[in-house]
Image: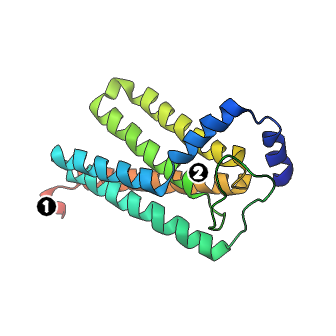
Amino acid sequence: MEERILLWIHGHERGALDALFWLSNQLGTTIFCTALTVSAVAFWIGRKNQREALLWVALGISTYVVQKGLKLTFARPRPDLWVGPVPTPESFSLPSGHAVAAATFYALVARGIALHYPKYSRAAYAGGAVMAFYVGFGRLYLGVHWPTDVVAGWTLGAAQTLLGFWAVRRMGRRTPSSV
């Protein structure tokens, strides 16, 4: 079934979509996500918000370590159905690291916008969800992941991010007498 889904998506391939999903590939690379994380940490430290900086550091590290560990654990081969506009990575397929990163980092960007502009919270989180979908779906369009790899990545990214949000919220409730 997963092969049929990928071939159906591939049947809608167009040059303009190749360029659009090439960009989605770039927005989930380790280099881009590392630069985003370092920039966000610097931003939050500059605003003297160590909790938000720590959240970015913790989720940045867990995003990398957990998905790499799971790839080695499952050792699932990537699809090899066509040659797309980006080279197929040599790493294993499950979970999609791009989907984990997108579900994590675009939610964190949305959180930052929501903290600074509360009246735009819904739009920020909706934008984060759209970006996570865009990056994850791009992995399918490019033919470098199976659909379940992407769903697993989104799930893992969302779960760790929600856990991180919960932890930061809990840290904020502590009083000096409860520490």
User: Looking at the image, which residue is at 33% across and 59% down?
Assistant: 57
Q: Earlier in the sequence, mark 2 or mark 1?
A: 2
Q: Which residue is mark 1?
A: 177
User: Looking at the image, which residue is at 43% across and 31% down?
Assistant: 124
Q: Is residue 69 left or right of residue 124?
A: right
> Mark 1 packing: few (<14 Cα in 10 Å), some, or many (20+)?
few
Mark 2–mark 1 distance (CA, rounded to whole Å): 38 Å
Q: Which residue is mark 2?
A: 154
Q: How many marks?
A: 2
As rendered, which of 179 and 63 lies closer to the eye?
63
Question: Eyeballing the image, is 46 above or below 92?
Answer: above
As rendered, which of 49 and 93 lies closer to the eye?
93
Amino acid bearing label 2: Trp
User: Looking at the image, which residue is at 54% across and 65% down?
Assistant: 67
Q: Nearer the viewer, mark 2 or mark 1?
A: 2
Asked if marks 2 and 1 touch (Cβ < 8 Å), the reply is: no
Secondary structure of the residue carrying tag 1 is helix
Q: Is residue 79 left or right of residue 168?
A: right
